[in-house]
Amino acid sequence: MGECREVAVSALLAVGAVVWLIVVPLMFAQGALTAFGIGLGPGNPAAASSTFTWASWLGAGIPVVGVVVSATTRRRGWTRFYGLGLVLVAAVAALRWVRTHPAPPPPPEPRHCVERSGGDNECPGG
């Protein structure tokens, strides 16, 4: 019984790696082709939305599940592989967040004369 479980866990981790390395990038490529209409006529971003959503969930979820399964079953190689995948996913998510959340604009300078105590008056005409 224990040997069957070992084989099943190893197969699950290997299938997860194949899906994460091959299927997820192909899903992103298919979404890009659909959204931008490259060679397929006019683009349709709405139709590509679900493909991008599934690819994003799989791209982030597979490394998380892989790290948990491989760490709990004490498979160091798989833990490193999925851990590096998780770092990559976190880096991509951080870059995406930075691009979609720009820094707030600096506070505007006063448009009128503001006199400050203890110094020269730099107001025009003052």
Image (cartoon, grey):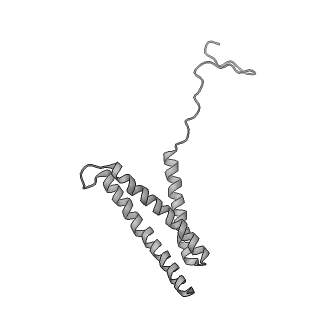
Relative to 1, residue 27 above or below: above
Residue 103 visible to an observer of this rendering:
yes
Relative to 22, residue 111 above or below: above
Q: Residue at x 43, y 72 (%)?
A: 18
Q: Residue at x 65, y 20 (%)?
A: 114
Relative to 73, residue 44 above or below: above
Q: Residue at x 75, y 21 (%)?
A: 118
Task: Residue at the far right: name it.
Answer: 118
Q: Nearer the viewer, residue 43 or 117?
A: 43
Q: Nearer the viewer, residue 107 or 67?
A: 67
Residue 84 in percent (x, y) is at 54, 68
Residue 15 in percent (x, y) is at 45, 74
Q: Quadrant of the N terminus?
A: bottom right
Q: Nearer the viewer, residue 38 or 20?
A: 20
Q: Residue at x 56, y 38 (%)?
A: 104
Q: Quadrant of residue 103?
A: top right
106 left or right, relative to 29: right
116 left or right, relative to 75: right
Q: Quadrant of the C terminus?
A: top right
5 left or right, relative to 114: left
Q: Nearer the viewer, residue 125 or 79?
A: 79
Residue 79 visible to an observer of this rendering:
no
Total labels: the figure holds: 0
Residue 62 in percent (x, y) is at 50, 66
Q: Quadrant of residue 115?
A: top right
Task: Residue at the far top: name it.
Answer: 125
